[in-house]
Amino acid sequence: MIDIRLVREDTDKVKKSLQNRGVDPSLVDALLQLDFEARTKATRRDELRAQVNSISKEIAQVMRSGMKDSAETLKEKSREIGSQLTAAEAEALSAEDRRREALLELPNLPSDDTPVGSGEQDNVIVRWWTPELGMQEGSEVVLPDYQEYQRKPHWEIGSELRILDLERAAKISGSMFPMFRGLGATLERALTSFALDAHSDAFEEIRPPTLVRTATMISTGHLPKFEEDAYRLERDDLYAIPTAEVPLTSLAKDEILSEQDLPVRMTAFTSCFRREAGSAGRDTRGLLRLHEFDKVEILAYTTPDQAGEMHAELLGRAERLLQQLGLTYRVLDLCTGDLGNSSKRTFDLEAYSPGTGLWLEVSSVSWFGDFQARRANIRYRALESKEIEFVHTLNGSALAWARIWAVIVETYRKSDSSVVIPEVLRPYMRNVEKISLD
RNA sequence: GGAGAGGUGCCAGAGUGGUCGAAUGGGUCUCACUGCUAAUGAGUUGACCUGGGAAACCGGGUCCGAGGGUUCAAAUCCCUCCCUCUCCGCCA
């Protein structure tokens, strides 16, 4: 959540910033009104409490000196104030709840560096990479010279080589659930080991739980606004995580870290579950959009000063994996209109799928400022000032496998219908060099 | 799932309904002593909300696992939930 003090003190800036996201600025005025009410009512409550407290102390003294009658008088007086207090408490509580709800609904303020725009079409392509041309600045991507046999969509390749079985996955779980088989399954496992090993120089490997409490989902900003998108286990009041960001961000919930511990770097491999409500029929063929997919996530807690550098590091790591896998990709600087709810700035990585002709989002690398840290109450004590401050959180996928799997089988398909395994993965899959029918 | 024990500050641990934000010990930091370290002595050491102040700081409120209740007053009594430990059952 954003800092209520900032809303009070720099209202215009907050309004302007949220307006760039398409948020109605009157919501800010409404919040300020709720804040005013909450503070007024809390003050009233605290005054009454102070009175009750001081009378209680008097009663204690009077009792000790044995003056029973005056104790009774005082008790009567306190009971009277007490009934006012009960009402004041209820009012203050509900005003504070309303303020909190309004605050939780507001998205983060975009960074000043985030391009202003109203939607997807305004995202800025900042650079791109192909195996042939390497890194290039700008937005005019020169695609590799794909052969006709690479223009086959991954779901056809997968069936042909019997490494992807979407029909039976549908039988088991329904549409938009994947099932990899044989070397297809091995390929996914290899990608996971490859990525985790790649991060092992600086990141602690974590295997977190994938079912989490409501409070955990609120911390990252996935609730209360996006209830529809999450799988919920009602009986146990748990949610299936949509990304490892959820448990990893809450790892240090309610803790005060030492500045010396920062930055904290973590990586985790988990399955991710998304209901994808409202996206039925749109780009859902094959592995393009799934209810369940696997992903390696990288995540960091930093001081505000370290955040910029860390954002670049996370992005660099995700890009490096794509380069090692030899996949053509482009980097998008998401505009204010397309930015995720909790993010201040996000770069998306899109890999090119020659079989479908689509750019597929395979990573999203975000800087959240202290938005999530406020919700999760993750703080650190500054070495110099000794002050306690909120950490900044950042994370990125490195990478999301189902779509990467798709792009790999299409990109590496040969004229004889086999799929060559990228060299970096071979050590992780028994040195198999290609997947073919024989 | 059943039975029992327990959750108190950075850690260990005491706590009679009122003088308890909380004994005591350890740790931390500061100072003194010491050639350095150690030892010793003195002091220090919570978070959050809110009002005042330029600030140092001062006032009020909250917090003893969480949420309710009883009471003039709750760490302390009652209820619900969560978590930890021990035993039994079940299980990969």
Image (cartoon, rainbow, N blue to C red):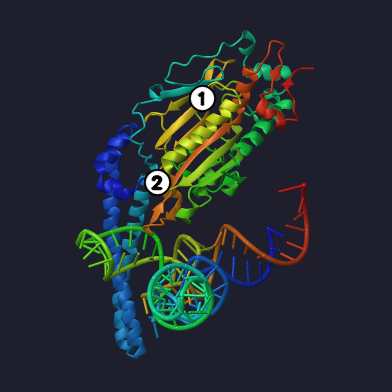
Instruction: Place residue A51 in its image quadrant.
Output: bottom left
**Residue B75 shown left or right of residue A83 in the figure:** right
Name the quadrant of the N terminus of chain A.
top left
In front of the other: label 1 or label 2? 2
Q: Quadrant of residue A20?
A: top left
The subunit letter for the residue under badge 1 reads A
Instruction: Give the image location of residue A184, x and y in percent.
Output: 70, 26
Q: Which mark is residue A350?
A: 1
- The three-letter code of the residue at mark 2 reads Pro
Q: Which residue is mark 2?
A: A304
Residue A420 image point, x, y percent:
69, 20
Residue A339: name its quadrant.
top left
Please give the name of the residue rendered at 34% of the width and 49% of the height, measured from the top-left corner.
A99
Q: CA distance from mark 1 to mark 2?
A: 28 Å
Q: Is residue A298 left or right of residue A112?
A: right
**Tag 1's secondary structure?**
strand
